[in-house]
Image (spheres, rainbow, N blue to C red):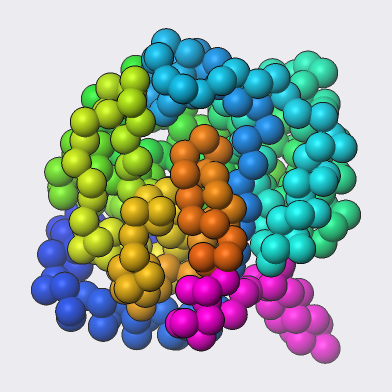
Amino acid sequence: MIRNNWTRAEITEIYNTPILDLIYRAATMHRQFHDAQEVQVCTLLSVKTGGCPEDCSYCPQAARYHTDVKVHKLMEVDEVMQKALEAKEAGSTRFCMGAAWREVRDNKDFDKVLSMVKGVSTLGMEVCCTLGMLTHEQAEKLKDAGLYAYNHNLDTSEEFYSEIITTRTYKDRLETLENVRTAKISVCSGGIIGMGENDDERIGMLLTLATLPEHPESVPVNALIPVAGTPLEDQEKVSVWEMVRMVATARIIMPKAMVRLSAGRVRMTVEEQALCFLAGANSIFAGDKLLTTPNPGVVQDQEMFQILNLKPRKSFKDSEKKSTKTHTQVI
């Protein structure tokens, strides 16, 4: 069932399945590979905010747009460690640090990020970073520091990409994913819907992810939150059914991946989020902010977990499975 040779026609057929049948198929697949009551709670912290030179149309951190985001220099290691501890105490098992950079540069700031990674990794949490484009050598340094995962979203399909971003290419994004994979770091890559793309372009993004040499271990599905001052400030809200189609299709074509219900949850009811969990989503980001955009509070999420009888997934679960499997084979 793990395939990397999906065709556009096959994914289109899945995506366009009548919605209740699609949910049933995805829920069935989900139960074959995952505990359906288990959801990983992640925290995303902006360790360097604003001032980015890129022109991503959705992003309030782009320096060229006039938004309410204030530029903040890279945080200190002690500050980040305190935030990571707070996240762990609130139930998060993955801690992701984001910096508004176009690319990683080999300088004191990168050295400080490496120290952050080393520090957070001692807490027993999965450490993730999203820092922009990355060379193979930089990926190796992050791996050596203890990085577990690296997020670098495709954002959208290759055919729609130039409508959203012009300051880097789709090939640049794919090269970073390859550098991360070569360094044996877990890959986190997904995209955003609601930016003006059509269904075929959403399918194109899923096709790219599902035909990578190895599927990403983590696939975030984001719904655009329009921000005043960005080119996409007037985009309409994505419906829950659009989110469900994306989540369910991702679950069916990438069965082992963690499908992360990411940006946009703040505009969804518990019932709408429950539909996404039923369709195969098994991870959320906790905390009142996702980098700079609003997100449900920790208390709200705890209440939702109680209502839906969900339980938090522990850190490094997949790694433990692999370790056990290898040990069994040796015996």
**Viewport quadrant of the C terminus:** bottom right
Question: On the picture, is 134 further left or further right than 257?
Answer: right
Query: Does residue 284 lie above or below 183 as drawn?
Result: below
Query: Does residue 109 lie above or below 136 as drawn?
Result: above
- Is residue 41 visible to the viewer in this orientation of the structure? yes
Q: Quadrant of residue 240?
A: bottom left
Query: Does residue 26 lie above or below 130 as drawn?
Result: below
Q: Residue 183 location in percent, x, y?
A: 69, 44
Q: Residue 305 location in percent, x, y?
A: 52, 76
Q: At 48% across and 50% down in the image, what residue appears?
A: 295
- Is residue 159 visible to the viewer in this orientation of the structure? no
Q: At 82% across and 62% down in the image, what residue appears?
A: 124
Q: Quadrant of residue 113?
A: top right
**Viewport quadrant of the N terminus:** bottom left
Q: Quadrant of residue 76?
A: top right
- Picture mark count: 0
Residue stretch in magenta: 302-331
